[in-house]
Each structure stands twice: as C-alpha cells, then as structure tokens.
C-alpha cells in the first residue's frame, strides 16, 4: 500500500490556471475522490500523478519518493480511462496481459494473473472476445482488470463510469468499491457526480477552478461544507441572502431575511450580511388550514413581523413526484423561492399548485456563509 | 523548476524530419534559387535571367500556354467527373461497380500513355484520322493545346469523380428533399442545392487536377507539337544540346513553384469561404430512372468511361499488331514484345526495385512524421508541417533539376545512381503520406496510447504495439497509392536516369519520342500488367478500396 503526497502543485495551460497550489495527502489504501465540475482541474491533477502532464510547480511523492522526474511509463500507476481505452486490435486476454508483458513477467504467471483479474472483473470466459464484441460496461471491466492486474502502486480512475447508463453506473460503482477494499490499493478517483463521490469514497477533495475547496470524509462534505460552492455542488441546497440580526434567547444567531427570521446556530460574528442555506430534505412542510396554526397566528398578532423564527409561509408553485419523494417549490414572497422535499410521500402529499403552506426551518439545518467570500461565517 | 525530459524517441524523429527536409528539399531548391538569381556571365547576383524571361515572347508565351492547358484540363475533368459522380451516386446505373473501377483505372498509368494512344488514333497518320480522310473528312490534327487538354481531361477526371462522389455521399437526403419540397427539381435542384453543397469536394478535386496539369511534362512533350509549356520549357532549357541554360531553367522552375502556390491559396480561399457543417442522418437515396431519361443517364456514364478507357485498350491492342521498324503493318504479331524482350528485364527490375525502396522510405518516414504532426504540439513539429508540404507545389521537373544541381558534387555525389531516383520518388510523395498518416491518427483516441504508456510500455514500444497496428490499414492503402505513383513516375526521373538506371516509364517515353509505338505499346502493356498485379495483391491482403487513390 502506497501513500500519495501532492505538494503545492500548480499547472498552467495557455490562458488557464488549471491547478493552483494543490496540496493533498492521501493515506495508504485510501479511496480518494477528486470531485468538481468540468474544467475544475480534477482530471489535470490525476494526469499529473500519472505523468501525462508535468506540473509547473510542486512535487508528487509516492511513499515519500519524489516521482517528478520519472517517465510516465515507469511510474507504476494503473489508470482506468473515461472512454475505456481498451485496445481495439487485441482481445480481452491480450489487453489485460499487455502491462504484464511490458514488465517481462513469465508466461505462466501472466496466464495465472490474467485469469485471476478477469475473474475479479467477472469476465471469465471472455478471454478471446475482441472489444467490439463487448458492451460498454464489459469494456470498462476490461479496463479495470487491465489496470489492476499489474498490481500498481496506485489506481487512477478518470470518470470511469460516466459513459455508462444510469443503472449500470450504480451497479459498477459498488463493484469498484468492493474490489478496491479487497485489494487495498490506494485509489484516486475523478468524478463530477457528487452522489457517486459520496457513495464510493473514503475521502473527497472538492475542486473548483484549479483550487481545492475542501477535503473531507463524505459526511463532512455534505453536512459541514466549508463554503457556498461545496454546499451547492454537493447535494441540493436552498440559498437565501440575509443579515445577522442579533442573538436569540437560546444564544443562537438570528438572521433576518426580509420579513422572516431564522435561527442559524452559533456564528463567529454578530452582525453583517450573510448567505444562509438549508437542504430541501431538512425542511418540514405543513399545509396551512383556515386561520393558520395557533403558533403562527399568535406570532402574527404579536408584532405583524411575519411568522415565528424559523417559520415561513408561502404558496405552492410546483409539486414534482419522483418516486421516493415529492419536491415542492414554494413562493414565499419578496423574491424568495424555497425547495422542500418530503420523503416517503402519501397520496395526500401530492398538493395542488396554489396551496397555502408553511415551512419549518430547524436551526440545526441552517448554515451561514459570508456574503462576500462565501466562506462559513 | 524541474522538467522531465521529452521521450528521446520522438526528438530523434523530429530531427530526422528536419534532416529529410533540409537535405532533399531545401538544399536542392536553394540551388535552383541560386542559379536563377546569378548572372551566367558575371557570376554575381542579378535579375538578368528574369529580364531575359520576360523579354522574349518565346518564354512568356509558354507561361500563358501553361495557364491555358491547365485551366482547360481542369474544366474538362470537372465536366466529365461531376456528371459521372452525380449520375452514379443519385440514380441507379447498371454496372456501376465496373464503371467506377474502369474510371479510376486511368490513374494507374502515366498520362503520356494516353497521349500517344490518341496520337495513334488521331495523329498525322493515326488510324481513325486516316479512315476519316479516306471518307473525305479532314479531321484536325490532335497535336497542340486541344490534344493536351483532351488527354488531361480524360486522364485526371477520376480525381474529380472520386472526390465528388465522396462529397455527394455525405449530403443528407433531407436537404435535397427539402429543395424538392420547396419547388426546386431537376437541374434547378442540382445547381442551387446539390452542387453548392459538394463544391468543397469538387474544388478539392479540381485543385489536384490543376496541379497535375500544371506540373505535367510528358503529355505536352508528346502531343504538344510546338506548343511549349513551363515544364517542357524548363526541361528543354536544362537538357538542351545547344548549350544548357541552368539559370533560365531555374527561373522557369521558380515561376512554376509560384504558380502552384498561387493556385493552392486560391483554392484554400474558395473552399474556406464555403465550409458547410451538416450532419449526415439519412444517406442519399438512389433513384430509379425510367425510359429516355434512364437511357440518357446510361449513355453519358458509359461514354465518359469508354472514352477514358479507350487509350489503354488501344495500347494493349496495338502492342499485338504486326510492325516493321516503327511502322505498323496490317495483322497481328508479337514483334513488339520480341523487340523489348531483352531490355525489359533490366527496366522492370529497376522499376520494381526503385519504387518498392521508395515506398518503404515513404511509409516509414511518412508515418512517423505524420505522428509528430498529429500528436506532438511542440514548436519544431509545428514548423515542420508547412515545410513538409513543399513537395506538393514543386513539379517533378523542378525536383529533377534541383537534385542534379545538388547531388552532382561532394559531399553527396549521387548522380547516375538508382538511389537518386529512389530519393526523388520519396520526396515527391512524402507530403501525401505524411498527411494521410496524420489524418489516420486523428481518428485514433490518444487515450489508447496513454493506456499503453501507463501500463509500462515505453513511448517507442507504445508506438509499435498500440499506435502502429491501429494505423496499419490506412498506412497500407497509402502505401499502395505511393507505389503506383512511384512506378509510373517520369517527370523527375527522366532528368536523373542514366542507361543503367532506366525505368519502365522512361523506356516507354523514349520509344514514343523516337516514334517506335509498337515497342512502346508492348512495354506499356507490361507496365499496366505489373501495376494491376501489384494493386490486386495489395487489395487482396489489405482489403483497401479505390478511395485510397486520392487519400
């Protein structure tokens, strides 16, 4: 098992900063994912580890040895490509054996190891097939077997599932995860699919414009995003512009958004503009009956200041049933539209457009970010 | 800042590219420029050669003549090639595979074979002309510009035909259906929709034809009579027994190069302004014609192909005619073959040896250089690209003159060797092979090579084990075409040969010039046979189609 250390890596292409001062430490045996939108530099970073790009600044270490000057064909990495890159002029066996032959492995051992790799990739019996006789999923399994069979120091996967259809993608990400656990090979995985990243990774680095935004375990990335970019890229999120308006009786910061006020946990400041966010599944939606709930009417009569803290009223403008959940879009007035989800919906939850509703925003669900920098407030 | 060194293999290949361009292209061409700009008496820099060129109508007329026959030949080729392509791709024509095969057959023989077989039919004592004279019809003689244009049109229209057919096959059916739906049918549909859409292909074909006509030397030599064009002028000035004029020959060469460059820029400009992107979803439909229209379409197609195949048929037929010296006698016999029997072995051996050696060079160098141009985005590779295109605009006659000037002294004394002929074949064909190599590579996913590298194969081993096998089918079809052009090459080799390095086309050409049509026909038949067998074998083992002829 091999550790990877990326130290201050920068890479510039004509007119673009592809990578800016990227430093990441990846532990031996870890499944590490580079996540970000296209053009964020994740593939560039992966190809820098493989040696296909030479960084302008910084160093790459494997197990503490600097490999900057090592030619790509001597780096002993196993790469899985987005478009499979299965050699079309070789059959499955020859494809998988290619790396072993380059390493002058004895013939009998090649046979043994290829058979084992094909068995792991569930491709036994396909040895004589040529790539054009294989489906996309099978071709990618060949790519996987071909990269694993050489027992590389690190496995590098460049969006290996993005060319497969949705169902196969879910199936194969499980397979890849299981295989990696079994082999224990340190793996760097590139994807733009946040759900895939959450499911498959030990740790994730979220990237944007060549800069690492946050490194953390999937739970941290999802629940405790360090800035608005990470919060919006991973999972769905409501964003609302507001202003800190003192502290509530419970000691939590209050954020004022138009006529509404939200409780936002403990913040490092007591005033200023912020952006608050909360995930659709964290909100609770209630149908407003005639006259409204007792608490609501009480709040209204008290100060004419809208509803109680963490409560927003609005009109349903869209209701989308997706199977496991219903997603509602609610117009709350003053340009504020929120998305709310209800899981395991009942028939009565298929509300008609125009219904008057009220939402509860729990303080624990609210994240606050600096309005200017986007960093956590 | 540390940088990994570039893989050494490709650096060496880049150096090789520059060495080839330097030694076999820039060096010979620099000789031509030197001679053109140096006064033959004083030995100093002067424009006296250019002054002499423009001062005498003898020279300037040949400039105009070249323009006339090149434009005429190109128009003629389009007139034959476009209708044939349109009719065979849009309507059902019986015997279409045979027609297209026969149509491209003409490309497999040197043009002067067409020239002298037309002489045998319509020359001063040509059989058809004699026949017509006997009937009291005085048919004008074939010698001169009309003869040249006739030969060029029939010889080179396959380029237009092949490229136009390719273009027509890529026009989505819905476009022509939309034209009909909007009320344009028949000729209107063809001229307003179909033809404009395939114009880039047609002009690309026309460009090839024009360049061929421009640089062709053997046809005007044989059928031109006193009608001089620039290539024959350069040849005569350079080899004249009445005192060679290398300076003037060089000047003429420079005009030829400028001429060719101008035409290329013109075509680029025309084609660049008319680039259409459209997606091919539905292949064009082949319609079935009825009655008179069907008969008319078939007549046009068969007439065009028959006219262009006629010269070859005549050559084969005449090779079996009885002869007495240079004169054909009634009846058939094998005298012509008997006459050439003794020398033919040496010239066949030479032709095969030189052309095959050249093909090996062309394929190896062209493929690796094509790789650099397609995959290596280094500055040296980018600069090499336009340099490698130079042979495309340098006519064979000019290559020949340049080679003689460059390699008639140390350090590279190669005059009179077969190697020099091989090198001339090689450099003339190199741009085509580099281009096709690069375009084949563009269709191969670079990730495959990265996979090879990533799995531990060195750059050289990756090229050998991954890239090359994938390129091979394309490379082979390119090699076939290179071989066909090499085995039929004459305009450079006619200047470079000596007795012992005689090749088939040169032998045929000399026989024709001496008026020995019988032996020339016999030799031409053998050359056609050799080319045909070679193509057949290559086709059988590689399964490549006739499309390779223009790639």
Image: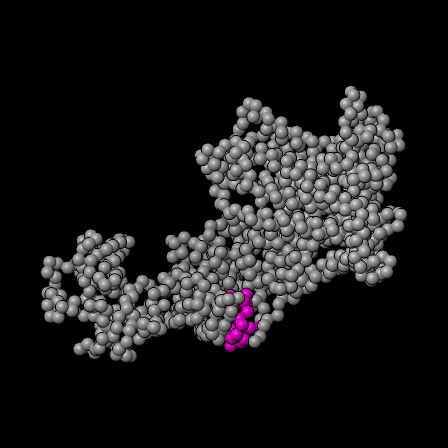
User: Which quadrant would residue B2 be assigned to in this image?
Assistant: bottom right
Asked if A200 appears above or below B197 in the picture, the reply is: below
Q: Classify residue B157 as left or right of residue B512.
A: left
Tell me which corner region of the image, top left, top right, bottom left or bottom right, holds residue B206.
Answer: top right
Q: Position of residue B240 (x, y in %)?
A: 86, 47
Q: Nearer the viewer, residue A156 or A359?
A: A359
* Residue in view at x 64 percent, y 56 percent: B370
Q: Residue furthest top?
A: B135
**In the image, is residue A58 part of the stretch drawn in magenta?**
yes
The residue nearer to you, when weighing B397 against A149, is: B397
Indicate the position of residue B208 as horizontal and vertical percent values. Answer: 66, 45
Residue at left 83%, top 58%?
Answer: B39
**Residue B107 to residue A35: above or below:** above
x and y percentages locating residue B177 in the rendered image: 47, 36
In the image, residue B6 lies in the stretch drawn in magenta: no
Q: Residue at x 69, y 39 (%)?
A: B73
- Seen from the viewer's position, the closer of residues A75 and B66 is B66
Q: Does residue B296 appear in this view?
A: yes
Side (left or right) of B73 relative to B491: left
Check the image and report above or below for B8 versus B533: below
| Residue A110 at least partly seen | no
Image quadrant in which the N terminus of chain B is located: bottom right
Q: Position of residue B292 (x, y in %)?
A: 57, 23
The residue shown at (48%, 34%) is B184
Q: Residue furthest front?
A: B55
Q: Which residues are magenta?
A: A47-69
């Amino acid at each position: 098992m091999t550790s990877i250390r990326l130290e201050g890596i920068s890479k510039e292409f004509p007119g673009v900063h592809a990578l800016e001062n990227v430093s990441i430490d990846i532990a031996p045996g870890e499944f590490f994912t580079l996540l970000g939108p296209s053009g964020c530099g994740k593939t560039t970073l992966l190809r820098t580890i493989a040696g296909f790009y030479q960084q302008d600044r910084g160093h790459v270490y494997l197990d503490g040895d600097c490999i900057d000057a090592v030619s790509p064909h001597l780096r002993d990495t196993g790469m899985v490509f987005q478009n499979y890159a299965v050699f079309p002029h070789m059959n499955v066996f020859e494809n998988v054996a290619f790396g072993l032959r380059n390493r002058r492995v004895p013939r009998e051992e090649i046979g043994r190891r290829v058979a084992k790799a094909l068995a792991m990739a569930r491709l036994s019996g396909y040895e004589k097939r040529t790539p054009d006789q294989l489906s996309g999923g099978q071709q990618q399994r060949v790519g996987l077997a071909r990269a694993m069979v050489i027992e590389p120091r690190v496995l590098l996967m460049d969006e290996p599932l993005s060319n497969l259809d949705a169902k196969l993608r879910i199936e194969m990400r499980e397979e890849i995860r299981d295989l990696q656990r079994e082999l224990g090979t340190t793996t760097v995985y590139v994807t733009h699919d946040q759900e895939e990243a959450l499911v498959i990774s030990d740790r994730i680095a979220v990237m944007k414009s060549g800069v690492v935004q946050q490194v953390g375990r999937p739970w941290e990335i999802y629940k405790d995003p360090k800035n608005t970019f990470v919060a919006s890229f991973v999972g769905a999120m409501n964003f609302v512009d507001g202003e800190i308006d003192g502290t509530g009786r419970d000691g939590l910061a209050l954020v004022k958004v138009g006529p509404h006020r939200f409780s936002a946990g403990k913040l490092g400041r007591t005033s200023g503009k912020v952006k608050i966010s909360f995930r659709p599944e964290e909100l609770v939606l209630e149908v407003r009956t005639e006259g409204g709930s007792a608490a609501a009417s009480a709040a209204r009569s008290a100060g004419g200041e809208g509803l109680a803290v963490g409560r927003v009223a609005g009109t349903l403008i869209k209701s989308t049933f997706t199977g496991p959940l219903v997603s509602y879009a609610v117009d709350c007035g003053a340009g504020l539209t929120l998305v709310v989800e209800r899981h395991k919906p009942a028939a009565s939850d298929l509300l008609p457009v125009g219904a008057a509703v009220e939402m509860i925003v729990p303080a624990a669900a609210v994240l606050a970010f600096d309005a200017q920098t986007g960093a956590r407030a | 800042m540390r940088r990994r060194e570039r893989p050494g293999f490709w650096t060496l290949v880049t150096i090789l590219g520059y060495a080839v361009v330097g030694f076999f292209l820039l060096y010979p061409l620099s000789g031509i420029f030197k001679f053109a700009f140096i006064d033959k008496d004083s030995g100093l820099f002067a424009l006296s050669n250019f002054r002499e060129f423009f001062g005498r109508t003898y020279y300037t007329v040949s400039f105009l003549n070249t323009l006339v026959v090149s434009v005429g030949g190109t128009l003629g080729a389009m007139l034959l090639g476009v209708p044939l392509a349109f009719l065979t791709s849009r309507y059902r024509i019986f015997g279409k595979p045979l027609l297209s095969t026969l149509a491209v057959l003409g490309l497999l023989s040197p043009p002067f074979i067409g020239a002298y077989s037309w002489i045998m039919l319509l020359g001063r004592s040509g059989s058809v002309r004699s026949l017509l004279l006997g009937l009291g019809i005085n048919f004008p003689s074939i010698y001169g510009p009309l003869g040249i244009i006739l030969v060029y049109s029939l010889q080179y229209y396959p380029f237009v035909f092949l490229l136009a057919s390719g273009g027509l096959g890529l026009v989505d059916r819905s476009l022509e259906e939309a034209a009909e739906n909007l009320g344009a049918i028949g000729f209107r549909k063809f001229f307003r929709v179909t033809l404009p859409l395939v114009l880039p292909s047609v002009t690309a074909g026309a460009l090839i034809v024009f360049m061929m006509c421009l640089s062709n030397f053997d046809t005007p030599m044989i059928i031109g009579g006193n009608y001089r064009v620039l290539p024959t002028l350069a040849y005569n000035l350079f080899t004249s027994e009445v005192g060679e004029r290398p300076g003037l020959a060089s000047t003429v060469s420079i005009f030829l190069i400028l001429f060719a460059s101008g035409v290329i820029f013109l075509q680029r400009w025309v084609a660049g302004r008319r680039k259409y992107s459209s997606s091919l979803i539905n292949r064009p439909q082949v319609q079935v014609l009825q009655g008179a229209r069907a008969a008319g379409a078939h007549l046009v197609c068969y007439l065009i192909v028959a006219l262009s195949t006629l010269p070859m048929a005549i050559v084969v037929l005449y090779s079996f005619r009885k002869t007495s010296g240079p004169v054909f006698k009634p009846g058939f016999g094998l005298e012509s073959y008997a006459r050439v029997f003794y020398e033919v072995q040496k010239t066949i051996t030479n032709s095969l040896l030189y052309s095959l050696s050249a093909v090996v060079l062309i394929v190896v160098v062209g493929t690796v250089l094509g790789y650099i141009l397609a995959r290596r985005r280094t500055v040296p590779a980018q600069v090499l690209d336009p340099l490698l295109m130079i042979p495309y605009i340098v006519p064979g006659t000019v290559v020949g003159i340049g080679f003689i000037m460059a390699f008639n002294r140390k350090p590279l004394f190669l005059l009179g060797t077969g190697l020099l002929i091989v090198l001339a074949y090689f450099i003339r064909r190199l741009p085509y092979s580099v281009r096709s190599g690069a375009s084949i590579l563009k269709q191969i996913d670079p990730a495959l090579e990265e996979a090879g590298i990533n799995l531990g194969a060195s750059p050289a081993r990756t090229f050998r084990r991954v890239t090359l096998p994938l390129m091979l089918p394309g490379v082979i079809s390119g090699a076939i075409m290179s071989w066909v052009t090499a085995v039929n090459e004459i305009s450079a080799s006619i200047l470079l040969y000596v007795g012992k390095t005689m090749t088939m086309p040169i032998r045929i050409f000399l026989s024709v010039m001496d008026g020995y049509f019988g032996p020339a026909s016999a030799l031409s038949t053998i050359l056609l046979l050799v080319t045909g067998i070679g193509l057949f074998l290559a086709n059988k083992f590689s399964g490549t189609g006739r499309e390779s002829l223009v790639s």
